[in-house]
Image (cartoon, grey):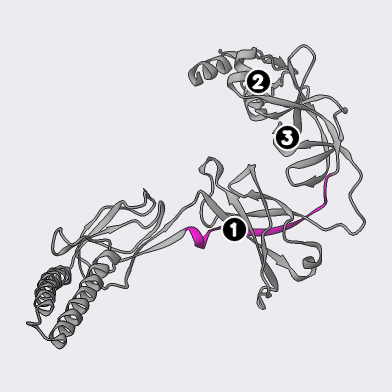
């Protein structure tokens, strides 16, 4: 289906009209000629469905005022884990690289740790001694019933069996805390990923001596992340936890993220004179990267009440063509026409339109970039020599 869509779109790019120096948008040539952008884009219903082009009527809506705040993407500490060596020894294998996506339980490295042998030996010894003590207790109980063993001997045997069982249980728990079984390679410890996620840091190489508390890697689950915004003091009175937020990252200006402000720090950064505000984000399309900078549009608390409804369109409907902001309107005949618009107040996910649209017109809200691509292909479709 995808190949069919690409082929169809490529075949559409062949209807440009050449004009001589008329000042319209287009691609200027060396001799000063330009190509006027087509006024219509016609696509079959099959292509529209495959490209997932969606429309909705222009309507009036209240666009809440927003304030801008800069910030960056950070990992959620609740979805981050440090991978410690847990045992002392020498790193024998490293099976991951920085940036790798690992699964929970996946073996990441192997540490040769002689101390593991003694842990398993201690457990084996304690299990044997516990079995012997229990056997002795059973024998003494039988003798005591025939008055052939004293109560003192019976009590001592019971105490010894209980104590050895407790020591064996503690030894078993020490192995389980390391993720090990009683049986296995006596001196090689497999280091496993505690969570699924991306490896942010690798701090280990083969042959490196390590201690139990040493961190060998940091993993973060980036399916969800935080945008940490910085609010200046004079803006605090206008912001509330629960406010809607639109985050625009510098790396993806045309792919805004939407979230809700869920935390405002209780103290001010004295040096920067700002307060940290947190916005959890879903990592749709796997675009979020730790450290990406951007800005947040936070809906402010308006003491004068809700703003007056105005014509508005979703931000995804807006594209830039030839240096102008346009939206695509679908006419009654099914063709798409670019309309230049003049914008007003921008809110989270929506923007007021002051000029260029009429209420009720069917505007493309998803797939506008596909239509722009077809439009630009058409512009170059009949260049000289083709």
Q: Residues within 10 Å of mark 1 (few under 14, many from 20)?
A: many
In the visual, does 244 lie left or right of 195?
right
The quadrant where residue 87 appears: bottom left
Give the Cα separation between the discs numbered 1 and 2. 38 Å
Q: Which residue: 15% across, 68% down?
A: 120
Q: Give the label on residue 72, or none.
A: 1
Q: Which residue is mark 3?
A: 318
Earlier-in-chain disc, 3 versus 2: 3
Could you tell me if residue 17 is visible in this image? yes
Q: Residue furthest front?
A: 146
In terms of depth relative to the viewer, which is nearer, 244 or 12? 244
Give the Cα separation between the discs numbered 3 and 2. 20 Å
Q: Which residue: 72% across, 18% down?
A: 38
Q: Which residue is mark 2?
A: 379
Residue extent of the magenta highlight: 63-79
The quadrant where residue 141 appears: bottom left
Q: Is residue 220 magenta?
A: no
Earlier-in-chain disc, 1 versus 3: 1
Q: Position of residue 128 (x, y in %)?
A: 10, 70
Q: Residue furthest left?
A: 148
In terms of depth relative to the viewer, which is nearer, 376 or 212? 212
Q: Are marks 3 and 2 in contact (CB under 8 Å)?
A: no
């Amino acid at each position: 289906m995808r190949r069919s869509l690409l082929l169809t779109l490529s075949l559409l790019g062949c209807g440009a009209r050449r004009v001589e120096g008329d000042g319209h948008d287009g691609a200027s040539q060396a001799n000063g000629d330009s190509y006027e952008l087509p006024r219509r884009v016609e696509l079959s219903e099959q292509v529209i469905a495959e490209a997932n082009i969606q429309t909705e009527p222009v309507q009036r809506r209240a666009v809440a005022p927003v304030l801008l705040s800069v910030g960056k993407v950070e990992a959620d500490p609740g979805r981050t884990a440090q991978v410690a060596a847990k045992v002392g020894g020498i790193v024998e294998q490293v099976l991951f690289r920085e940036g790798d996506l690992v699964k929970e339980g996946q073996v990441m490295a192997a540490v040769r740790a002689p101390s593991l042998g003694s842990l398993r030996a201690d457990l084996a010894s304690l299990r044997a001694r516990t079995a012997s003590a229990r056997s002795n207790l059973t024998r003494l109980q039988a003798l005591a019933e025939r008055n052939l063993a004293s109560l003192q001997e019976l009590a001592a045997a019971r105490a010894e069996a209980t104590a050895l069982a407790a020591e064996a249980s503690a030894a078993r728990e020490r192995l389980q805390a390391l993720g090990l079984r009683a049986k296995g390679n006596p001196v090689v410890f497999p280091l496993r990923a505690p969570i699924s996620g991306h490896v942010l840091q690798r701090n280990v190489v083969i042959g490196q001596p390590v201690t139990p508390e040493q961190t060998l890697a940091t993993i973060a689950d980036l399916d969800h992340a935080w945008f940490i915004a910085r609010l200046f003091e004079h803006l605090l009175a206008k912001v509330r936890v629960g406010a809607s937020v639109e985050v625009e990252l510098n790396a993806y200006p045309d792919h805004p993220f939407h979230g809700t402000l869920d935390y405002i720090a209780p103290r001010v950064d004295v040096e920067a004179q700002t307060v940290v505000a947190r916005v959890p984000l879903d990592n749709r399309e796997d675009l979020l990267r730790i450290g990406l900078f951007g800005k947040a549009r936070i809906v402010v608390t308006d003491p004068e009440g809700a703003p007056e409804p105005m014509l508005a369109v979703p931000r995804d409907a807006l594209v830039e063509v030839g240096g102008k902001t346009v939206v695509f309107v679908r006419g009654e005949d099914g063709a798409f026409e670019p309309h230049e618009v003049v914008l007003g107040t921008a809110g989270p996910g929506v923007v007021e339109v002051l000029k260029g649209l009429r209420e009720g017109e069917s505007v493309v809200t998803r797939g506008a970039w596909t239509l722009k691509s077809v439009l630009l292909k058409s512009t170059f479709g009949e260049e000289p020599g083709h």
